[in-house]
Amino acid sequence: MSKSLKALCLFCLSLFLISALIPAQAEPAETGLHIYFLDVGQGDAAVILCDGEAMMIDGGDSKYSSFIYSFLRNTLAIDEIKIMVASHPHADHAGGLAAALNACPVGVLYTPVIEYDTKTWHSVIKYAEAQGTPILIPEPGEQLALGGATIDILGPIWYSSNMNDLSLIIKITYGSTSFLFTGDAEWDEEHDLLEAGIDISADVLKVAHHGSDSSTSYVFLREVAPAYAVISVSKESQYGHPHSETLSRLEDAGVTIYRTDLQGTIECVSDGITITFLQ
């Protein structure tokens, strides 16, 4: 073998050895905004992923704790929740948040009230405090970031003795698409926002209070003007949710309706321009 050929072989061998030591490039992270409206029966729970960051709004009743834990750890493989929101402390919204706090570290917990005397809520506060998660009451107008998405706190803007009307109302904007989460807000809180002139328009509306007739008034729905609505509700709701009056208002407005009692967990994806629902 000539010296030049031998040198070429040694050079190629060295390149091979060096390349073997360099880790293979990881697959690019999933892009866009992904919202999972979880099937938690007569409750509310949603997980939002954007550019590698995670957010959770409500966690359903505590009886869904195993499902919440597994969905976060196994289905989505989430290792940290940047923002956690308890729209209000009622058990059907906050119960499963204790499981989420056990599943992974949480950067901050937002809630409209900190003091609420139920065993379920005490459990949420206990696990948040155990891991050192700040528990904050946000102000209307406060703005947060989740990856490339903007999170706006819209309400409540006034105190109410009705816990439903103290629900945190949150608007998520990603590109030219937007999503409105309303907790269990009823007529009074809806009209507080309208009278304050707050921009509540959104492409997707998470229908308040599981489709109860006490929410989603005509005037509120007209201002939101959603193309899609998601109702989180049990297959055998003891309250008769969603009420026919609410469904009628949504249908009259030409809104495409998705329901967890009919379709199970619903995934909604936005690329910043187009919204797609996956089932």
Image (cartoon, grey):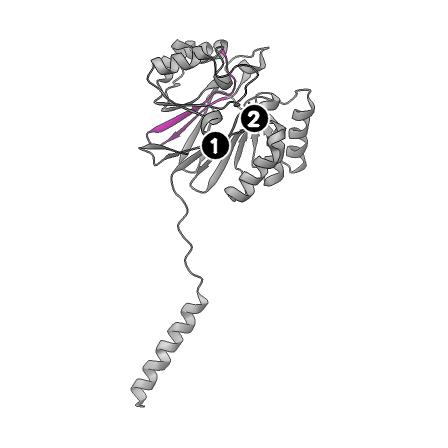
Write down the region rendered in magenta.
169-186
Q: Main secondary structure of the magenta part?
A: strand
- Type of amino acid under label 1: Thr
Which residue has dot 2 on it?
86
Say few, some or many: other residues with alpha carbon within 10 Å of mark 1 (under 14 / 14 to 19 / 20 or more): some
Mark sitting on residue 41: none
Q: In which quarter of the image is the N terminus?
A: bottom left
- SS of the residue at dot 1? loop
Q: Position of residue 97 (x, y in %)?
A: 59, 31
Kindly identify the residue that appears in the image at 40 percent across and 26 percent down. Answer: 179
Residue 274 in the image: x percent, y percent?
Answer: 31, 32
The answer to whether residue 219 is left or right of residue 125 is left
Specify whether 99 is left or right of 228.
right
Q: What element carries label 2?
A: loop
Question: Where is 82 relative to 223, above or below?
Answer: below
Residue on which the image places disc 1 = 265
In the displayed structure, 142 sits above or below 26; it is: above
